[in-house]
Image (tube, rainbow, N blue to C red):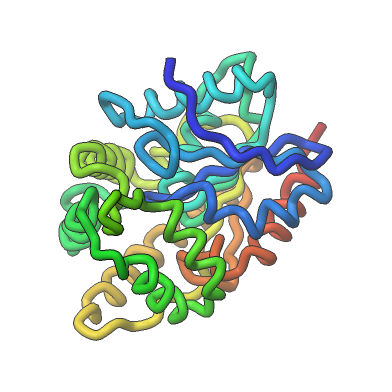
Amino acid sequence: MTLLHVRDHGGDGPQLVLLHGYGRSLTDWDASAALLTAGHRVLAVDLPGHGRSPGISSWTIPTVVRCIADTLDARGVPEAVVVGHSLGGLVAVECARVKQERPRARAAVNLDGFWWGREYPGGARVSEGLLASAGIIAPPEYVEEQVVHSARFGIPADRAEAAAREAARQLPDGKWQTMPSRTEALEIVDELHRLGALGVTTWLDGVDCPLLLVQAGRRLPPAPGMEWFDEFNGRFKRGVSDELAALSRTRPTVSVKQIDATHSMTLETPEAVATLVAAYVRGLPD
């Protein structure tokens, strides 16, 4: 059994479990969690190989879901709404797929957690970028560089610094090691491609509990030399939007929303994220 690192934000009300994205940590949720505790009991979890959670020998979605379930069970959580961003959003949906009595996913919220199959045009370049940054040794200035990068999204420096520090491991010589490790990153990308190859509609088959599927409404700010990514991302998002619109018309348990933010929404607009999640949970059936 592998128990994961948890930050207990407290609060009173329906239980929420918050999951972060690839290469990030539970600190990404701090600002939203502080708002959500007004009406919810809130736990944030570091995924395996991220933040302060231990790694696992084989990073597969079923194993990760089991680790989350064991962690919640160990904390006496019988039921929760699982809310995930990016990679965490895909994992949240997979938590909702599992039909077990305890702990049970009452519903799942997926914040911009969609992927593509291995053969999707242009997708290999994005995957290469993820892998290139996994488990590397970065200079002592790494955190400061991340703060400067985050400013492009309007993310406050203190929030960006705290998130960057928790998403990497500082070494004795002052350098930083990014997470996850290269080995785990390869396994994660394989899992993403496996799910993405199904397409959104087929992927969600068999998930019967309520789902909120959210897309970022704004594109990432353009970066020099990355013009190809803007075209790729726009094309992929349009395809996902079409599938989500069709799903929302035929599956009464599926709700679809957009949020006025880029993919970095949990750091960029935590107030809007908290408002969206809280409103959705209030509307769930008892």
- Give the quadrant of residue 231: bottom left
Q: Quadrant of the N terminus?
A: top left
Residue 280 visible in the picture: yes
- Give the quadrant of residue 190: top left
Query: Which one is nearer the viewer's eye here, 215 or 71?
Result: 71
Report the side of 190 relative to 251 (left or right).
Answer: left
Q: Quadrant of the C terminus?
A: top right
- Where residue 97 appears, as percent x and y from the top left, is 51, 28
Residue at 53 percent of width and 46 percent of height: 84
177, above or below 104, in the image: below
204, above or below 70, in the image: below
Residue at 38 percent of width and 24 percent of height: 63
Residue at 52 percent of width and 47 percent of height: 26
Report the side of 142 relative to 201 (left or right).
Answer: left
- Where residue 117 appears, as percent x and y from the top left, is 24, 48
Report the side of 128 relative to 39 (left or right).
Answer: left
187, above or below 103, in the image: below
- Where residue 179 appears, as percent x and y from the top left, is 31, 47
Residue sitting farthest toward the front? 173
Residue at 51 percent of width and 60 percent of height: 162
Query: Which one is nearer the viewer's eye here, 222 or 132?
Result: 132
- Where residue 124 appears, as percent x and y from the top left, is 16, 57
